[in-house]
Amino acid sequence: MEIALSNKVVVVTGAATGIGAAVARRLAGAGVAGLLLTDRDTDGLARMSDSMPDCAVRYCVADLADKSAPAAIAHAAIVAFGRIDGLVNAAGLTSRARVTDGSVEVWDELFTVNARAAFFLMQAAIRDMLSRRAPGEIVNILSVNAHCGAPDLSIYSASKAALSTLTKNAAHAHLADRIRVNGINLGWVDTPSERHLQAVTLGRGDGWLAEESAKMPLGRLMQPDDPARLALYLLSDASAPMTGVAVDLEQRVTGAPV
């Protein structure tokens, strides 16, 4: 099935690398009318923009920990393209914390970026859609950890569960407005940030990827393009009228015995 998005202007967060960058590339390939990329990595955004010369691309450097960032990002998209038809909340933090060692600082960090920023970006996009009485699509990158979560991901799991509920709430609230909001409950993905986290932050060294890949049913971790292809489908008219759905994208079936 060929998917075209030639009539849509889409905002993608976390677009300098990893999943957000993969989503941006897929959108550019689908011929979007406009693409607003945002991240806190200025050089990464510039490289992404330069790599898509045939697409109308603009970028906005912003740190989602800043409470003014969502409004600034939405404003940049509207100034550049006049509207927002789609939003992909791909940015996120995965700081580790257990129930027994979680801190207020980690809680605030994760909920600020993973839930608060995503909520206010949804708010800005939906307000623009409503002001124009236009349909729209939002895709939130969630996590399979929202179902429960690994012990060292307690706060992260809670932040993604919050965004999962907000996804369904927004979908329900704006179903009659033809604004669709869906999510992807994502499993373990091989991204540059995950490689640094595992090898350096967690001290596992360069061999961690081969070790973990060997344990997976597919013999590999998922790649950023796996959720990117699904996000493209959810943003397209081909997925209508699907809304309020959180799709598990993982190498296991939720509820199946381990």
Image (cartoon, rainbow, N blue to C red):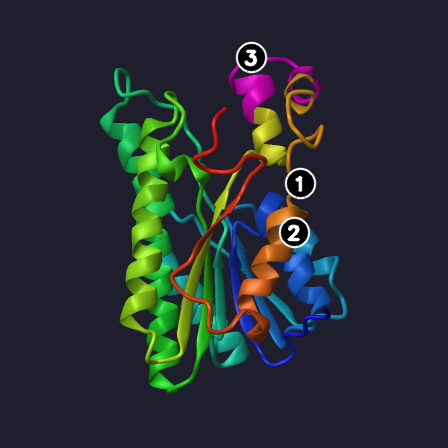
In the image, residue 50 lies in the stretch drawn in magenta? no
Q: Residue at x 54, y 78 (%)?
A: 81
Q: Which residues are magenta?
A: 197-210
The x and y percentages for residue 145 are 41, 35
Mark 1 lies on residue: 223
Side of 12 relative to 96 (left or right): right
User: Considering only vertical position in the picture, is 189 above or below 102?
Assistant: below
Numbered mark located on residue 102 in the image:
none
Residue at the outermost left position? 104
Mark 2 and 1 residues: CB-CB less than 8 Å, in contact? yes
Residue extending farthest to the bottom is: 133
- Circle count: 3
| Residue position for label 3 | 203
Answer above or below: position of 89 versus 10: above
Mark 2 highlights which residue?
Answer: 22
Mark found first going from the N terminus, 2 or 3: 2
Tell me which label, 1 or 3, sits earlier in the chain: 3
Query: For mark 2, does the 10 Å Cα neighbourhood hold few (<14), some (14 to 19), or many (20 or more) residues?
Result: many
